[in-house]
Image (tube, rainbow, N blue to C red):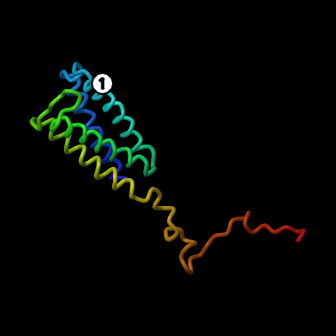
Amino acid sequence: MTLRFLAAVAVLTSVAIHLTLWFQGMRSVHVIGPAFLLNAAGGLVIAVLLVRWHHPGAGVLAACFGMATLGAFTLASTIGLFGDHERWTGVSVFAAATAEIVAIVTGLATMLEDPQPEARPEARPEARPGAAVAQSPVGSYRSERA
């Protein structure tokens, strides 16, 4: 469960940075501005899913979010993205990159963790040899017809 919260915090950190940059002027960039807003909306949904939906798919979404966001910035800083050329300078760039790397790693780890550890057979008392098992009244009912 801790991995889910860490992944959600990483995604929300990236969302906060992208929203801040959007308000600071990225909204006026032709394609990148709306992409920042979509990134923020999608990140909010993914963070909620990480906390509320206990399914490996939430981890996949967090990892894909981190890879897509970090990949888009890497493209923008190397060959350019939609005519926009960025540089790896500033605290927000490195903070977002770190948050996205954490989102990738924790998202993949969340995907691999056991979603219901209490449902494993060795965790149930009746699965252990020699364990006393209480029988329910419904299970002890016999039909008189037989």
Residue shown at 45% from the left, 61% from the top: 117
Residue shown at 28% from the left, 52% from the top: 105
The image position of residue 12, as x and y in percent, is 29, 38
Image-quadrant location for residue 20: top left
Q: Residue furthest right?
A: 145
Callout 1: helix, strand or loop? Answer: helix
Left or right of 80: which side holds 53? right
The residue nearer to you, when weighing 59 against 136, is 59
Question: In this figure, which residue is indicated by the disc labeled 1?
Answer: 34
The residue nearer to you, when weighing 117 against 107, is 107
Q: Residue furthest bottom?
A: 130
Left or right of 10: which side holds 54? right
Q: Mark 1 packing: few (<14 Cα in 10 Å), some, or many (20+)?
A: some
Residue shown at 43% from the left, 51% from the top: 56
Residue shown at 39% from the left, 54% from the top: 111
Amino acid found under the numbered disc labelled 1:
Pro
Vertical comparison of 140 with 7: above or below: below
Give the quadrant of the C terminus: bottom right
Q: Residue furthest left?
A: 89
The residue nearer to you, when weighing 33 against 76, is 76
